[in-house]
């Protein structure tokens, strides 16, 4: 019987992958365990090994066999049938891009696949009807669907009862030891518990070390949680087509110049990964200016734009996508010729996962890392997105009720956490049973909950070890691929014979003078827009702040300007050093002052000029950097021949700063999706949702808008002499500060100035924390 099953499996594979396709031995072992033995299987296999073939072939065979999910009873027929009561395969898949690829692949094999996700809400009812009619072979859902109240309460119970095969794709996301932990994946434990006996389960990943493998196997286990109940198939992580190398360059300008010199030498089309949204945009703009057809791909882009960019790369219409980790798991272009990283990811596991996009169906692909000195600061920023400290968690739990849901927006004024981090925390608490998501928000369950500080500390320590491993990868004297494989606990790792350490470097660190000069000029251009605030945060009345709705037009600031963002490749490093808490307060340096003058000149005469020339300068009184901000205002007034009208004073100059300015380099948005879990960020369909670099409240990145407005609402006063000067003005004032973090300091102070008679306010800062 097993021989006939294998023969049929080979037939389905050929239909899926071509006449010459043959099952690998571990592919057959997985299919056999799922179809014949009805076991739970964990496949830890390299990218391109064919994990999707396992679940598509298994789906076809299970649907043909038509067996019910539970054990056959006397008289039941287990032979072929159209559907035979056997339910669909459910694939939990983390990315919309991955879902699209998998639906197309299923269709090639004659498998009817559908997906339920946030992008096709209007199709849900029809797809649900198809499922009940037995017309769907494969249903792909995102992990977030598992705890959508409507889906969880109305669709999921029936789905779990009829599922023929459960597939957990990118299963390392289940483990908070993995590089991409997501709380929603933990909801799978409930799904697993509700599956009928003997329902086969397959989990797949290419990026799991021994610790992650053991953790995932335990969570996949039966009610005994015995990992021995799970068949673990772990293969070699060698990638024979990949040639790895590192090019060490001294500055962002050198890295961009090098890329401009060498991009046309890289084979085919590929991906250039950056660590931040800002870097992705700057790199794409620069490469286009050098004549390369490239596109930027980040979590901040619209879904339609991301899909178009993916298709352009698939069709080889562009040389490269310049992407954050938003383009990560699941993007499938078999002939991808290269992957270049401008900056190192924070772990060998994440790096291996991203470089695995290349060389699936080509003999040779180039993989190059161009590390930067700023990488460690960006890693620190991501680390600051870890699970919040216990006092903040307890504050949220105390604010929730058991009889009436509280929305995430209503919780923001209660606790100083940005929304993405707050939502992540609530998801973890939901999985732990302390809260429950319902229509309208969150309920307290009343169940006891313990803060596992020891585990969080162990996870943080593991992250630090991974970061050190990435530093060592860049400098290792030995084989680079062997180093990565050993960090992923591949006990078959040997020297690859292909990397720059084994075979010598194919690319040197030379940068042509024209390319370097162009990069330096490009990155040296100062100027970034400070968008104005137009709406007050919700829920301010709950904390005694009488503000809500739209900010009146007569109290708003206009769009402002800054020299740059802290995450910029060009001015970012200079501004981070200037605004670092360890830097002594001093007058504004000449090079920075010159950049401010250039920004003002472009603002006056560029493509998007200010509506009217300012008639005076006002400084935001700074507790942390009074000399820097004061001297900046004086220099601007002198150069522009404008009166220095004065300063808006802090209400309590001795108090801690209401909008702290502890500077960290970090991404403007994060891979993945929201930053999630005790271990740090996760990259979802929209990419990393990590907020911008910059000031934080307390232990990490800045808090949410409601908390910022609450702290700043009464934090400044307009002295009498400044009020008198404002009352007679005939034009806008320049409002000068060092750092725009949340943006609410500028908004609150601008409101004060306008209420005292300023016709308009033009914010001007040295840096934007993003």
Image: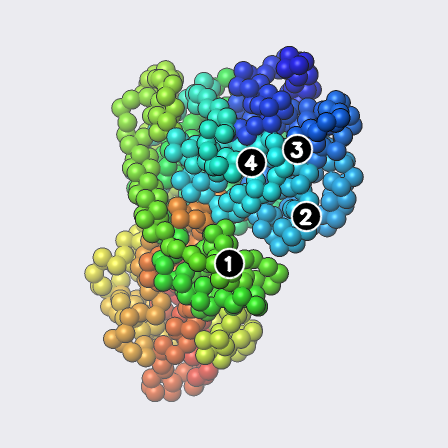
Q: Quadrant of the N terminus?
A: top right
Nearer the observer, disc 4 or disc 2? 2
Q: Which callout, 4 or 2, points at the residue further toward the start of the chain?
A: 2
Query: Which residue is identified by label 2?
Result: 155
Mark 4 vs mark 3, CA separation in Å: 20 Å
Q: Secondary structure at mark 4?
A: strand
Nearer the observer, disc 1 or disc 4? 1
Mark 3 vs mark 1, CA separation in Å: 32 Å
The answer to whether 64 appears left or right of 397 in the picture is right
Give the image location of residue 152, x and y in percent: 63, 50
For the residue carrying disc 1, how many other residues have a C-alpha within 10 Å: few (<14), some (14-19), or many (20+)? Answer: many
Nearer the observer, disc 3 or disc 1? 3
Circles 2, 3 touching at the beta carbon (< 8 Å): no
Nearest the viewer among 575 and 299 is 299
Q: Quadrant of residue 255?
A: top left
Nearer the observer, disc 2 or disc 3? 3
Q: Secondary structure at mark 2?
A: helix
For the residue carrying disc 3, how many other residues have a C-alpha within 10 Å: few (<14), some (14-19), or many (20+)? Answer: some
Q: Quadrant of residue 76?
A: top right
Q: Which callout, 1 or 4, points at the residue further toward the start of the chain?
A: 4
Q: Which callout, 1 or 2, points at the residue further toward the start of the chain?
A: 2
Q: Secondary structure at mark 3?
A: loop
Q: Quadrant of residue 522?
A: top left
Q: Which callout, 3 or 1, points at the residue further toward the start of the chain?
A: 3
Q: On residue 70, which mark appears?
A: 3
Residue 347 visible in the snapshot: yes
Residue at position x 45%, y 49% from top? Answer: 676
Q: On residue 435, which mark appears?
A: 1
Q: Secondary structure at mark 1?
A: strand
The answer to whether 160 appears left or right of 210 in the picture is right
């Amino acid at each position: 019987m097993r021989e006939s099953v294998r023969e049929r499996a080979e037939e389905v594979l050929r239909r899926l992958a071509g006449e010459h396709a043959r099952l690998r031995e571990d592919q057959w072992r997985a299919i056999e365990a799922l179809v014949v033995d009805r076991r739970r299987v964990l496949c830890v296999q390299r990218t391109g090994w064919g994990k999707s073939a396992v679940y598509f072939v298994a789906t076809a065979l299970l649907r043909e066999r038509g067996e019910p999910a539970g054990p056959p009873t006397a008289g039941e027929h287990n032979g072929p049938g159209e559907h035979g009561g056997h339910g669909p395969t459910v694939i939990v898949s983390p990315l919309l891009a991955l879902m699209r690829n998998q639906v197309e692949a299923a269709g090639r094999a004659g498998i009817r696949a559908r997906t339920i996700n946030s992008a096709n809400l209007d199709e849900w009812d029809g797809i649900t009807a198809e499922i009940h009619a037995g017309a769907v072979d494969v249903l792909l859902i995102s992990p977030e669907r598992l705890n959508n109240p409507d889906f969880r309460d109305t669709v999921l119970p029936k789905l779990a009862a009829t599922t023929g095969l459960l597939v957990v794709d990118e299963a390392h996301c289940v483990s908070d030891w993995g590089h991409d932990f997501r709380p929603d994946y933990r909801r799978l434990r409930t799904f697993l518990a509700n599956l009928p006996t003997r329902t086969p389960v397959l989990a797949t990943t290419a990026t799991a070390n021994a610790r992650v493998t053991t953790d995932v196997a335990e969570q996949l286990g039966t009610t005994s949680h015995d990992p021995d109940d799970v068949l673990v198939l772990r293969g070699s992580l060698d990638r024979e087509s990949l040639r790895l190398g590192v090019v060490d360059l001294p500055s962002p300008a050198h890295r961009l110049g090098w890329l401009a010199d060498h991009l046309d030498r890289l084979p085919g089309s590929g991906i250039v990964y950056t660590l931040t949204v800002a870097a992705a945009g700057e790199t794409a703009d620069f490469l286009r200016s050098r004549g390369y057809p490239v596109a930027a791909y980040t979590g901040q882009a619209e879904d339609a734009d991301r899909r178009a960019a993916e298709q352009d790369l698939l069709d080889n219409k562009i040389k490269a996508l310049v992407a954050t980790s938003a383009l990560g798991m699941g993007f499938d272009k078999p002939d991808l010729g290269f992957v270049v990283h401008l900056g190192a990811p924070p772990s060998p596991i994440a790096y291996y996962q991203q470089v695995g996009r290349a060389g699936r169906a080509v003999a040779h692909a180039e993989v190059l890392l161009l590390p930067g000195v700023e990488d460690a600061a960006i890693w620190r920023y991501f680390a600051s997105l870890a699970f919040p400290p216990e006092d903040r968690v307890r504050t949220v739990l105390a604010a929730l009720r058991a009889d009436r849901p509280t929305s995430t927006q209503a919780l923001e004024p209660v606790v100083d956490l940005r929304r993405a981090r707050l939502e992540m925390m609530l998801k973890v608490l939901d999985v732990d049973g302390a809260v429950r998501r319902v229509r309208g928000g969150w309920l307290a369950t009343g169940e006891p909950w313990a803060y596992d500080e020891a585990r969080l500390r162990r996870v943080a320590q593991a992250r630090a070890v991974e970061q050190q491993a990435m530093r060592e990868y860049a400098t290792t004297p030995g084989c680079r691929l062997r180093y990565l494989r050993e960090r992923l606990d591949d006990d078959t790792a040997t020297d690859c014979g292909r990397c720059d350490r084994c075979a010598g470097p194919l690319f040197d660190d030379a940068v042509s003078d024209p390319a370097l000069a162009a990069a330096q000029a490009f990155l040296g251009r100062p100027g970034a827009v400070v968008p104005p605030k137009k709406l007050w945060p919700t829920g301010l009345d709950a904390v005694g702040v009488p503000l809500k709705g739209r900010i009146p037009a007569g109290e708003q600031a206009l769009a402002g300007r800054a020299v740059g963002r802290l995450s910029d490749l060009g001015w970012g490093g200079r501004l981070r050093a200037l605004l670092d808490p360890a830097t002594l307060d001093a007058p504004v340096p000449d090079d920075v002052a010159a950049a401010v003058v250039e920004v003002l000149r472009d603002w006056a005469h560029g493509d998007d000029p200010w509506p009217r020339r300012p008639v005076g300068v006002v400084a935001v009184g700074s507790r942390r950097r009074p000399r820097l901000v004061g001297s900046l205002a004086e220099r601007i007034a002198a150069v522009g021949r404008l009166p220095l009208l004065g300063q808006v004073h802090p209400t309590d100059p001795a108090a801690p700063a209401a909008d702290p300015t502890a500077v960290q380099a970090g991404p403007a948005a994060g891979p993945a999706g929201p930053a999630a879990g005790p271990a740090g960020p996760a990259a979802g369909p929209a990419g990393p949702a990590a907020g911008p670099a910059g000031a934080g409240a307390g232990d990490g990145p800045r808090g949410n808008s409601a908390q910022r407005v609450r702290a700043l609402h009464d934090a400044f006063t307009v002295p009498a002499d400044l009020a008198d000067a404002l009352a007679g003005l005939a034009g806008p004032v320049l409002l000068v500060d060092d750092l725009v973090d949340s943006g609410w300091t500028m908004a609150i102070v601008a409101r004060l100035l306008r209420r005292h008679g300023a016709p308009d306010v033009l914010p001007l800062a040295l840096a934007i924390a993003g």
